[in-house]
Image (cartoon, helix red, strand yellow):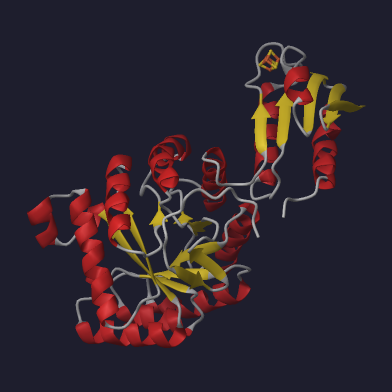
Amino acid sequence: MSSQVRLARRRTRTVWVGDVPIGGDHPIVVQSMTKVPLEDVKATVDQIIASRDAGAKIMRVAVPKVQLLDAFQQVVKASPIPIIADVHFDPRIALGVIKRGAAGLRLNPGNISDKDWLRRIAEELKQSGIALRIGVNSGSLPRDLIERYGRTPEAMVQAALRYTSLMEDLGVTNIKVSLKSSDPEVTVEANRRFAQLTDYPLHIGVTEAGPPVEGALRSMIALQELIPMGIGDTIRISLTSEPALEVRTANEILRLLGVGNSPTIVSCPTCGRLQVKHEEFFQLAERIANRLTGVNLNVKVALMGCVVNGPGEAGDSEVALMVGGKDQVLIYYKGKPYKKTTWDKAEDELVALLSKLTPDK
Ligand code: SF4
């Protein structure tokens, strides 16, 4: 049982992606997507493992060609977490990934115009029991809905309702839905409206959110409205960056919104008082943040550059370091000075202390 803080979550059905439950009162699941060509199985698996280490519970992989089905199967076999296949336009790929171990399928039924193919996909989905994600994106809405509603939240909601009822009519009920726009307010409004009409679990996030800084902030604007409404069962932060950074950002956003359980990192911005190179301090903070993402520890870790604010923040942290100079780094443990060390050894000392803390159950 996670110690994740539960807000009043919207009641949804539970959909399983492999052994990972999504919806119901299960914790919000962080996911990401691989970004290297599937031809390169090793690079794809490496990104999955890095994302898992950062706290991703499931991963999505684009399968753009039928020729890649064998590579997809190799990735599924090597992956430590369930894989969702992202398929567009070609129904043969959809059938192929189901047979090759996909734990979930992301498909827009509107992209499969032939009803016989859609029926065959629905049959395979029912027999395999794998989850279907219907993804509605404001950039690819059906023409008739754009003519009627414009590119509005309502058009997105109507598209999602159309696709979900199409699949339900074919007997597929193991469905989760996403309604995404690159505009946070449109994303919020579409999800809010759709959430009132159905009990499908919702995959939330802002699409094409941007480079890391812009993308994190734009995603936060949407999530800080949706999460407190109890909306959102799985999240992906779309960044123009590595998948592991998407996962780290997702975990940090959830923690800030009170639904995650990961370490709080406090680090000073540095100034002219710092007695080691500021680049080295930045890199240390980045490495520590990477090592701690996905760690199930509700602790505060402080990285401080001098005595101005150092003792105060370090005294309020489970683990901390305060720099006096290359040969004078003071490590704190549970709010108290613990030992003196050097800058070169400080990171390992800090991580060794963190490993002494017991992960929250
Ligand atoms: S803690 Fe010290 S080094 Fe860091 S910003 Fe404050 S004054 Fe500067």
- Image position, residue 49 (x, y; %): 63, 60
- Say left or right for 62 vs 45: left
Position of 244 relative to 142 (above/below): above
The quarter of the rendered structure image containing the C terminus is: bottom right
Residue at the image point whose x is 73% and y is 12% from the top:
308
How many numbered callouts?
0
Position of 218 relative to 110 (above/below): above
Position of 179 relative to 173 (above/below): above
The quarter of the rendered structure image containing the N terminus is: bottom right
Q: Is residue 111 visible?
A: no
| Ligand 1 quadrant in view | top right
- For the residue pair 85 and 226, the one nearer the viewer reads as 226
Residue at the image point whose x is 75% and y is 18% from the top:
312
- Image position, residue 235 (x, y; %): 46, 53
- Say left or right for 157 vs 50: left
Q: Is residue 41 visible?
A: yes
- Say left or right for 234 vs 147: right
Residue at the image point whose x is 47% and y is 66% from the top:
61
Residue at the image point whose x is 30% and y is 56% from the top:
196
Quadrant in the rendering for residue 79: bottom right
- Say left or right for 194 vs 142: right
Residue positioned most to the right: 339
Position of 288 relative to 167 (above/below): above
Quadrant in the rendering for residue 357: top right
Quadrant in the rendering for residue 127: bottom left
- Image position, residue 84 (x, y; %): 47, 69
- Image position, residue 126 (x, y; %): 39, 85
